Image (spheres, grey):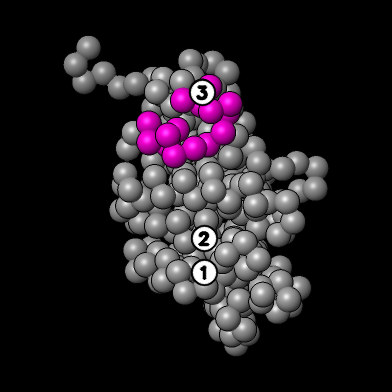
Amino acid sequence: ARGRVDPTTLDLASCEERLRASPRTAASLDAHLQCLLGIDVATPPHPRVYAEVSRTLYLRGVGWPSPDRDDLAAARGWALRCLALQPGVAGRLRASGGRITEDVVDAVFESEVDCLVWGAMAWARWIDRQGAAGVGIDLEPVQLLADRAAELAPDWDEGRPRWAVALARGVVPPALGRDAEQVAAAFAQARQDGGDRLMLRVDEARFVAAPAGDLDGWRRRLETVADAPVDGQDLDAYEDLAAVAVAARRLAAGPPPPSVWMP
């Protein structure tokens, strides 16, 4: 009927309402994830559900990681499942043997930009967490996802696709052709789009300041984030809380040694 609201959209709104009414804790984020998974069990596959599950797993993996689970890999998996709901993408994935190729991402529509972004960002952070060894095969597909998102909807969510592009370039090790100037320019563009996102400052410390040997800039960015107040009850607020937690952990651990970045 005309004007009818998709029931799944109402279910997603209900999950978000519960999250907003809950304390800002890791347990509340876990409960939100379970709410989303409950929708998935009860309804046919839906791209917005898959995207929200991916985003929630991504945030938990960044801010509240656990050795007992790999939330970033799971977030990537849900994002790719989201993309595969499109028949054109599913067919090309089968033809490529499940690999993310340029032909595959070319079949993704703008309506699934959220799945492209969360998949790219989760995959990039997973690469960063693994270290340089054994991740070369993952670099091209994560860049393809990010580039396609930026091509389709560069301004989505205050320019988050451009942030994904910067992150996908930032995790490239020097030995595999990391272009420091390109990375710095990409993060500068992401900063122009994304304003005062706390996690973006954390990323600039990690992928711009530290590789350049700018330890004062590295420390200054992280200290600013670690001391920042966080407002709100939505998933954006949880991203800020994750940024505060990551900044505190990295300050406690100290800057990465130059050998990690310098050729």
Q: Is residue 93 magenta?
A: yes
Asked whether the beta carbons under mark 2 and mark 1 sit within 8 Å of each other, the answer is yes
Q: Specify the quadrant that holds the C terminus.
A: bottom right
Callout in the foreground (2, 1): 1
Label 2 vs 1, first from the N-terminus: 2
Residue furthest bottom in the image? 216
- Amino acid at pointer 1: Asp
Q: Nearer the viewer, residue 2 or 69?
A: 69
- Disc marking residue 95: 3
**Residue picked out by circle 2:** 169
Up/down of 216 relative to 157, above or below = below
68 left or right of 149?
right
What residue do we see at 47% from left, 61% from top?
166
What is the spatial separation of the Cα atoms under label 3 and label 1, in whole angstroms?
Answer: 32 Å
Q: Nearer the viewer, residue 112 or 60?
A: 112
Magenta segment: 92-107
**Residue picked out by circle 1:** 179
Callout in the foreground (2, 3): 3
Label 3 vs 1, first from the N-terminus: 3
Q: Specify the quadrant that holds the N terminus.
A: top left
